[in-house]
Amino acid sequence: MSWFSFNAGDFAVAFLSVLLEGIPFLLLGSVISGLVDAFVSPEKLAQVLPKNRTAAVFVSGLLGLAFPMCECGSVVVIRRFLRKGLPVGCAVTYMLGAPIVSPIVALSTFAAFRGQNPAEMTMLRLGLGLVIAICVGLLFDRLPVRSILQSGVASPEAPPAPRQARSGLSVGTTPGALDSPLPLSVSTKFLRAVYSAATDFLDVAVFFVIGAGITAVLGTAVDRSLLEPLAATPLLAIFAMMSAAVALALCSTTDAFIAATSFPGFPMTAKLAFLVFGPMFDLKLYWLYGLLFKRKVVVLLGLGLFAGIGLICWRLQTLGF
């Protein structure tokens, strides 16, 4: 019996089912991302953050609930925020947390895992994503800014304050390379939001279509017995799913549909690792993060997230989740 048997009709049905189920969430996420890009300035974001730096990092992890942002668009927005002087710890926490701790992601995850404990998976995904984002943000907040950021990313007029002087959030007003020096009209901001949403949608849709195609092939053409050795060992299944998340490079608004349908034999903790690690680090994000951080920092961030999320999910597996 061949391990690969392709049928065009079965492939088309599986491909379109995943595509049509996930595209509405991708479109909604792109629209909200564009509105955030156009209407939420670093100054407005800083106004809702506490003056205490540690508390500000914790609150930054929850900002995705009010200002949801796809991971693809978050890097450009975060670069703008950093140039305006937003603290690095807050920026990193929002960058990692917003693609997961989001109402759009909660809805799509719940919808994708219907019949597979959707409430539990949704709460675990958002909760673990929040915890990881805050921990990484607190770590970055204690590192020297110039040792982690690319030159020109940090605010030119607001260098990092000494440790003993860090009592509040200082957001500069000097426009960065991506900001207009003049106030924009509401109509101009709407046009900017439409352009940003369309750009995000087209960029991310490419990865989602590729992911849907791979999902359809795995579901209809590949012999499932080949995946059984991976699925049978919890720790191996977890690391395999995270590796798949890196390769597929999906959007957080649609990746739950891939996880729920492509790997039916894998434990829920492996799918959880896929859904938490993927929005924080994948192939496209490796290159995008290079716009913000020095390359060695990007590599260490990826390795740290891979090991940390994998071990946490493995521990959850041993506890019976």
Image (cartoon, helix red, strand yellow):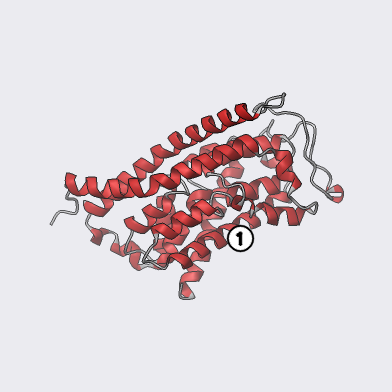
Q: Tag 1: Cα neighbours inside 10 Å, few (<14), some, or many (≥20)?
A: some
Residue at 55 percent across and 37 percent down: it is: 34
The residue labelled by disc 1 is 131
Horizontal placement of 170 versus 126: left or right?
right
Horizontal placement of 67 versus 44: left or right?
left
Up-down: is 234 above or below 93? below
Judge by depth and name the residue closer to the eye, 199 or 280: 199
Kind of residue at disc 1: Val
Horizontal placement of 293 versus 266: left or right?
right
Judge by depth and name the residue closer to the eye, 109 or 160: 109
Residue 73 x/y as whole percent: 54, 39
Residue 108 x/y as whole percent: 44, 54
Up-down: is 152 above or below 8? above
Residue 71 x/y as whole percent: 53, 44
Residue 96 x/y as whole percent: 58, 49
Residue at 75 percent across and 56 percent down: it is: 54
Residue at 40 percent across and 40 percent down: it is: 207
Kindly tell me whether residue 258 is visible in this rendering. yes
Up-down: is 197 above or below 22? above
Residue at 46 percent across and 75 percent down: it is: 320
Kindly tell me whether residue 146 is visible in this rendering. no
Extreme residue toward the right, this view: 165
